[in-house]
């Protein structure tokens, strides 16, 4: 039968794509964990200025948008279609460079483990049973290696935007391309079952970690061993190479493209509306994700089942989440809301929630409850000068961190591509989706200018907010 034969070929093809994705993700997790461990040690050495520069260069690949990276390397990937091994190596290298900072952050901001290295060494040479030793091992610093490794595997396995732009051998690219070109939603939902099952062990491990007691994140920072010369050289080379490949070269290509296409930007009358749609969506979903994340972190009565129900959808990746919400909102019960902003907003909030919770963990990790209490006492002082000084300190130590976290969450939503491409409702055209569609026609000159404007607009808005805050502060001091 033709239908059965075509479905068999379809299944075999997606099986190969899943196999390549698993192999690549395992390699990235193993290599990334080794690099993250030695980078963590290097970040605790040297002067404060050197560490700040290293942090900046380390984190920049993760925050470099996939649209900007895809704008730079799509043509290169297309030229390597006849040499698929080189194309896959390029894609895997870029993804590894983007994700290693995530593992480093998780390791640096991890609390002290319940079982120290000394206690683990004593247990190893004692007569304790293997089951007890394995239980102690899971409560040592190995647990953070497992969580960071699971995170690297999940993020690389779920990556869809750059895979689609570079036509990488990935299950996300395979399903998304065919879904966008007419594959039925029912078939797409069937095809994501196996990838979800592959992710399930890592999803459960991360959900358990996020459910951990919040008080553990006030522990003192882990002390790492002295990094040797070879490791220091490897860390410096890797961080510099990642900064050049993922951030500097795409930024240079984007600047050249923007200069060449600056004249054609006047022929883009829809750009303000597209930017407005993206900003409105980003602010709405970003604030909702932060409010929900704060509620989850502060709640002491939240059941484990409800927490997993909130976290697991976002941990499955934006492609799976988008297809699931498309299916849910096409049922008879919710079909009335399918052509509304509701599916896209709900999906983006759930996609942002796990990332927001990790940011909250890092925020808790860097704060002191006693210092916060003393600062709050000064803010309620009867001395106006003392209150102003306390408010300034509150902004320096707390307000700026909250602003940075809000900007990061909203920026993730602002440039999110996969969910709008699946769940966008009639009349809405986010700029990320428009740019993605245009990139399939090559590196068009005006595209660089349009992408540059898209990236600069949020920065300008943040600078305006900071300037208004300074003006308000000077005005209040005069009063």
Image: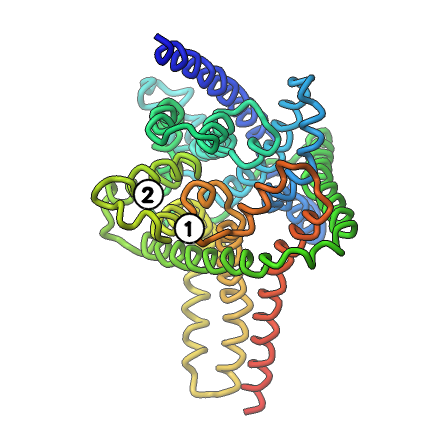
Local SS, label 1: loop
| Residue 21 left/right relative to 80 | left
Q: Which quadrant holds the N terminus?
A: top left
Above or below, 79 relative to 313: above
Q: Where 199 sits versus 332, above or below?
A: above
Looking at the image, tell me whether mark 2 or mark 1 is earlier in sequence order: 2
**Residue placed most toward the observer, 208 or 413:** 413
Query: How far, Cα to Cα, is label 2 from label 1?
Result: 38 Å
Viewport quadrant of the C terminus: bottom right
Compared to residue 427, the image places residue 328 above or below, namely: above
Instruction: Tell me the residue that label 2 is attached to.
Output: 211
Q: Where is residue 80 in the image (x, y as percent from the top left)?
A: 70, 23
Quarter of the figure with residue 86: top right
Callout 2: helix, strand or loop?
loop
In the rendered image, residue 418, in percent from the top left (x then y), is placed at: 48, 40
Q: How crowded is mark 2: few (under 14 residues within 10 Å), some or many (20 or more)?
A: some
Q: Disc 1 marks which residue?
A: 426
Residue 155 drawn at (x, y percent): 49, 34
Q: In which quarter of the view is residue 472 placed? A: bottom right
Residue beneath the point at 39% across and 54% down: 289
């Amino acid at each position: 039968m033709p239908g059965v034969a075509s479905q068999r070929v379809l299944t075999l093809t997606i099986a190969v794509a899943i196999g390549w994705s698993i192999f690549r993700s395992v390699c990235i997790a193993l290599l990334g964990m080794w690099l993250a461990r030695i980078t963590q040690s290097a970040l605790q050495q040297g002067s404060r200025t050197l560490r700040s520069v290293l942090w900046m260069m380390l984190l920049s690949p993760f925050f470099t948008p996939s649209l900007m990276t895809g704008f730079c390397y799509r043509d290169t990937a297309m030229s390597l279609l006849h040499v698929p091994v080189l194309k896959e190596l390029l894609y895997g290298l870029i993804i590894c460079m983007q994700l290693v900072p995530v593992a480093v952050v998780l390791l640096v901001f991890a609390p002290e483990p319940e079982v120290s290295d000394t206690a683990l060494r004593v247990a190893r040479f004692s007569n304790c049973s293997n089951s007890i030793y394995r239980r102690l091992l899971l409560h040592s610093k190995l647990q953070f290696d497992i969580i960071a490794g699971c995170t690297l595997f999940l993020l690389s396995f779920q990556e869809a935007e750059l895979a689609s732009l570079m036509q990488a051998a990935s299950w996300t690219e395979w399903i998304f391309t065919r879904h966008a070109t007419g594959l039925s939603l029912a078939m797409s939902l069937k095809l994501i079952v196996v990838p979800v099952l592959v992710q399930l062990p890592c999803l459960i491990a991360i959900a358990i970690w996020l459910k951990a007691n919040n008080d553990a994140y006030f522990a003192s920072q882990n002390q790492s061993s002295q990094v040797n010369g070879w490791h220091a050289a490897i860390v410096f080379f890797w961080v510099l190479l990642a900064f050049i490949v993922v951030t500097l070269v795409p930024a240079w290509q984007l600047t050249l493209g923007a200069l060449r296409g600056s004249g054609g930007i006047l022929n883009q009358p829809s750009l303000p509306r597209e930017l407005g749609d993206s900003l409105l969506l980003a602010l709405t979903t970003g604030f909702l994700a932060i409010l929900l994340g704060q509620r989850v972190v502060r709640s002491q009565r939240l059941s484990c089942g409800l927490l997993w129900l909130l976290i697991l959808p976002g941990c499955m990746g934006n492609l799976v989440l988008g297809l699931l919400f498309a299916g849910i909102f096409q049922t008879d019960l919710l079909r009335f809301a399918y052509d509304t902003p509701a599916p896209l907003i709900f999906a983006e909030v759930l996609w942002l929630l796990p990332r927001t919770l990790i940011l909250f963990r890092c925020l808790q990790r860097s704060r002191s409850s006693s210092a916060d209490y003393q600062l709050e006492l000064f803010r309620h002082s009867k001395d106006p000068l003392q209150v102003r000084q306390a408010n300034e300190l509150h902004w320096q130590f707390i307000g700026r961190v909250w602003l940075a976290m809000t900007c990061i969450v909203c920026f993730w939503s602002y440039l999110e591509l996969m969910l709008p491409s699946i769940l966008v409702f009639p009349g809405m055209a986010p700029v990320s989706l428009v740019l993605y569609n245009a990139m399939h026609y090559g590196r068009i000159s005006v595209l660089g200018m349009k992408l540059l404007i898209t990236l600069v607009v949020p920065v300008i808005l943040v600078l305006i907010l900071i300037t208004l805050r300074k003006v308000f502060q000077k005005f209040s001091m005069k009063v």
